[in-house]
Each structure stands twice: as C-alpha cells, then as structure tokens.
Image: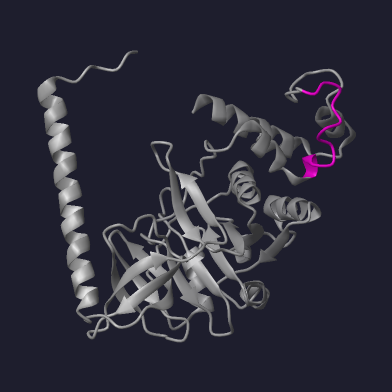
Amino acid sequence: MSKRKLSRQQRWRIEKIQAERAARAEKQAAREASSLEAGEYGPEKPGRVIAHFGRTLDVQAPDDTMTHRCHLRANLEGLVTGDRVIWRQAQDGSGVVVARDSRDNVLERPDPRGQLKPVAANIDQILIVFAAEPAPFANLIDRYLVAAEATGITPVLVLNKVDLLPEDGGELGSLLERYAALGYAVVRATTRTTHGLDALHGRLQARTSVFVGQSGVGKSSLIDRLLPDEALRIGALSEDSRKGTHTTTTARLYRLPAGGELIDSPGIREFGLTHLDEQQVTEGFVEFRDVLGHCRFRDCRHRDEPGCALLDAVGRGDIAEARFASYRRILDSLKSS
C-alpha cells in the first residue's frame, strides 16, 4: 500500500512542530550550560544509574551510598539502569548527568511495535527466574536463553518456590536437569526457607546481574530476602488465574552488602526475538553448535532436508526433541511477527 501524500498545510504543521521542539531543546541546553558555567554544580564525577524515570534518573557515585535524583542534559538520550555516567552535583544534593560513559553491553528487548528498547546495561549475567507457580513454559525459558546467548551475557537459571514441588522435583526438576546437562548454571531456591539462598548469594557476588522472568515468579521476593533492608512491594498471586501480579514498574539496581549488584526488571510475560535472524536463533541453542556446518546442503533450513545434521542428531538423541521443537516454534514466531 502506498503512503498517503501529505498536503502542503500538513507538511507546514509538521515542520512547525519539529522547529518548536528543536527551539525548546536548544533553550534548555543553553539554560543548563549557563547553570553549569555559573558554578551551581560541582565538578564532574563518575556515577551509576540506579533507576530511570524518563528525563530524570537516580545516580550513585562509586564511593557513596546516597542516591541523587538527576536530570538529563537536553542532548542526552537513551540511558538505562546500569549505565555508567558522568554527572555534576548541585548544592541541594540533586544533579545533572552530562555524559554517558562507555558500555560493556546492553540488554534489549523489542517493544510492542517491534522497536528495540534497552532494559539494562553493563551486565555480567542474566538470572532467568521461573517457578512452580505461575506455570513456566520451556519455550519462554528458551527465548531468554537465546536472547542471552545473542547478547553475550552469561545466563543462570533460577528455579524459585521449590517448596511447592514434589519430593522428586517433578517435571520442573527434570527440566532443570536437562538445562544443567547443557552446561547452564542452575540454582534451586525458595523464599520460605533459606534453601538455595547461599548458592544464590555466591552467584551474585562480584557481578552485576539482572533478574528477568514472567510476573509472579518471585523475583522481588528473592531480592527481598537477599536485601532485607530494602522496602519492596511484593505482589500476591491471583487466586483465580494463578498468574503474577505485576509490581515492579521500572528497572532498579541494588547493591549487595557482600559485593555485587543486581537489577530487578519489570516482569516480562513475553520475550520477543523479532530483532534476531534465523542464524542468530539457531546459534542461540548451545547444543546445536557442534553440529552446525555439517549438513549436506550449505543452505539447509533444518526442516526435512536430506542429510540435515541437526535432524540426524535429534534422531540419535544427541539433541532433545523438546528443545528442537521449541527452536522450530521460535523460528515460526519470527515469520508470523
């Protein structure tokens, strides 16, 4: 369908709005520059974004336990929780962020329009939290794993609420063992006792970690146990739907007493991978890597082609049928999006 041609009046209105926005941004930048030159702010110093609220954000200096509410310079965009920044402090304790420092990495996910939206930056590992309730889906876990592999951030699987599982672990226990066999680090925990909390502490020390997972799996409850002095709003599970009640509204970074940092992100029921291509998804399944490149045909799509090394590996039991089916569902979702 061809685009509708704009009338002269419509083009004039759009150009006028754009010019007004540019003028406002220029005035704001001039006011900020004047304030900085007038000595209303102290010298530049490094900091870390603790939380992000649109044009304002919370910043902490490396040697400071206090959080400072800062606003962004008019020409500065795209900051997220975990970013390293350069900022200047005002006499009242607030501040202004004047620059973003370099990033090691950034975790992104597509928004409802398919545009990539950064979630957090400078992360060492992604803790993928799932639980007995709400019921987890292996395909959702696989999506998180593929996203982590594509970003180059180490994933860790955390099974929460193990007190709700049968003694033998049930299907979830078996699922976790399959992921452990693939080389993924796994942690079993519950917030009702201290079970697994020491192992979780060990995983978090000296690292910056981000908690992800669908709403209601207990991410905030785990953080509440790890940081008992933090006041967190814990959402109760809906008795009717047994789905999570969303409580976290913005990604926030917490510093652990024993060292390390963790970021709690808003609950994600779906984790789209529309920004990845088929090759990136395929490489995101770690057990495929030794087999890739051995198909009879170079352009093999791993469906029903003769001599497909992946299909042969599934037939031999070297690749789990459930994981291969999950892989196919992810690829199909890319085509339908």
Q: Quadrant of the N terminus?
A: top left
Is 231 inside the magenta-drawn segment? no
- The residue nearer to you, when weighing 128 against 133, is 128
Q: Nearer the viewer, residue 173 or 125?
A: 125
User: Is residue 289 highlighted in magenta?
Assistant: yes
Residue 99 point in image, percent of width and height: 38, 66
What span is colored magenta in the figure?
Answer: 287-298
Q: Which residue lies at the image location 48% right of the left edge and 47% below the top edge?
A: 109
Give above or below for 199 relative to 269.
below
Q: Hey, which residue is sitting farthest right in the picture?
A: 316
Relative to 92, 280 lies left or right: right
Task: Name the image quarter holding residue 115.
Answer: top left
* Prevailing secondary structure of the magenta residues: loop
Tell which of 272 and 227 is nearer to you.
272
Residue 103 placement (x, y as % from top left): 52, 61
Q: From the top left corner, tell me how far across and down residue 277 is, in percent.
A: 60, 33
Decide if residue 242 is in sight here.
no
> Looking at this view, is 113 or 320 the one in front?
113
- State the residue at coordinates (19%, 63%): 30
**Residue 213, placed above or below residue 224:** above
